[in-house]
Structures are given as structure tokens and as C-alpha cells.
Image (cartoon, grey):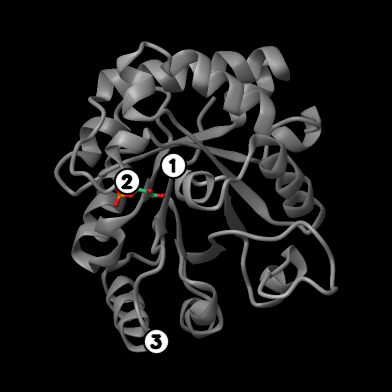
Amino acid sequence: MTRRPFIAGNWKMNTRRQTAIELVRQLLNGLNQDVRTEVAVCPPNPYLTVVADLVAGSPIELGAQNLYPAGDGAYTGEVHAGMLTDVGCRFVILGHSERRQYFAETDAFVAEKLQSALAGNLVPIVCVGETLEQRQADQTDEVVRAQILGSLEGLDEVRAAGIVIAYEPVWAIGTGLTATPEQAEAVHQLIRKLLGELFTPEVAAQIRIQYGGSVKADNAAQLLSQPNIDGALVGGASLKAADFLAIIAAAEATLA
Ligand code: 13P
């Protein structure tokens, strides 16, 4: 089973209109038109349309960082799947650890969002990952297991094959600490095994699992060479065109 590598940039609450435009222009300049790796950027909501216009017709796809699982209605401050596809999004990040931590998002809420994303024709990138305390207490496997089971609750086999999972150990996010390729691969293997039990091994073999957590130009190649690491969800390094392009190049090299 060959899974197409997938590199996504999570810009989080960074960039302004002008820096977003410059970043995308540099990415478009540096990116080969026939890049085989799937590439997406996930800007803050106010800049989605600006970026959508710039990337139209290019290999760069658009993702959002969150959604609210409802249709049009009285939900002040929220944005739903239909609005995101309307402005050109193909992906949506769900259950990022920053949302779990600062906005008290539970697995059950992530599962609701997942249904909403799929019903709205968005490809969800479902994030899971343990904290430093949990890793030190040897709870990584059970934490990740519970997050996968809870966040994918209600997902059927047919739709499961199209989702993306991102394993992002919380202790590696924005810290400069990266899981070693072996540490990451071990959790990716566990996730794939779990997906095989939840669905079928054939479906599990199709689901792309990204690694996230201080992925940089100089560690991407090693991480991406692991058999169960199918891409990266990149924070800080996605804000610098040269770094993000180097990470994409590392993914391309796995296809050579
Ligand atoms: P950093 O790459 O900045 O560690 O962020 C990772 C992340 O949270 C991507 O979603």
C-alpha cells in the first residue's frame, strides 16, 4: 500500500494579511508544479480567502484549523464546514492539542466535529498525542488509544479510509524537542494497528498518519523515512517558506 505523502502547514494564530501573501508567494515560487507530495496550508480564518485566491490552480491546497459542528445558525464567533468549503478549504484540523488544552475540547466533541467535516466534504486531520507527564508515566499508548477510539467514535469504514490522523506529542509541539524517529514510528504503528481493529487492516493501510511536533528542515527526512509516518503537520517551520519547502523536498525524496 503506497500512501501519498502529505505535508500540511498549521499556521496557528500567526501571520497577517501581508505576511500570509508573501509566504504563499514564496511557496508558489519554490514549489515544483508537479510535486507528488500533497501539500496544504492552514491559515487563520480571516486569511482563508486571501490564500485561496493565491493558491487557486496550484498544487497547494487549503485547510482550516477548526470548525463548529452545526449548520447556519446563532453560534456567535463560530464557523461551520459549509463556510470552509465555500471559501475553498479541502482540509480541516480537528482536536489539535491546543484546542483540547485551551478550549477544553473532548474526544466526544472532536467526534461530533468529525461527522460534521465529513458531511460537509472536508477531509479531517484528527490530532492525538500525549503530554510529557503522560509519557513519563508510561501512559502514551493508553492515552493515544483512548483519543483515537473517542475521536473516531461513529466513523464508518467507508469514510475512515479518507481521513488523516496527526500524531502530535504535546511535549514536542513548539518546544524544539522532537520525538525520535523510533519513538514516533512506535506510536504510528500502534495507531495503525488500532485502526485495523476498528475498521479493517485494508482500511488502516490507506489512512495517512502525519507526525507533528517541531518538524524542521533538518529532522524531516529521518522522520518521513519511517514506514508508518506518511507526512507531517508542521507548525513553526511552516511559517518560513524555505523551511517548509525543505520539508516538502524531504517528503518528495521518500518517493524517489
Ligand atoms: P511545531 O511544529 O511548531 O512544533 O507545531 C506542531 C503543531 O502543533 C502542528 O499542528
Against 165, residue 137 (above or below) is: above
Q: Determine which of the numbered discs, if any, sits on residue 5 in the image.
A: 1
Q: Secondary structure at mark 1?
A: loop
The answer, for residue 147, to whether it is visible in the render is yes
Residue 140 shown left or right of residue 162 in the figure: left
Label 2 CB less than 8 angstroms from ligand 1: no
Amino acid type, mark 2 = Glu
Label 3 CB less than 8 angstroms from ligand 1: no
Q: Secondary structure at mark 3?
A: helix
Camera-nearest residue between 118 and 178: 178
Identify the residue at image location x=30%, y=35%.
Answer: 171
Identify the residue at image location x=28%, y=66%.
Answer: 239
The answer, for residue 36, to whether it is visible in the render is no
Q: Secondary structure at mark 2?
A: helix
Q: Determine which of the numbered discs, if any, sits on residue 252 in the image.
A: 2
Q: Position of residue 241 (x, y in %)?
A: 24, 67
Q: Are marks 1 and 2 in contact (CB under 8 Å)?
A: yes
Q: Determine which of the numbered discs, if any, sits on residue 17 in the image.
A: 3
Amino acid type, mark 1 = Pro
Q: Position of residue 20 (x, y in %)?
A: 36, 79
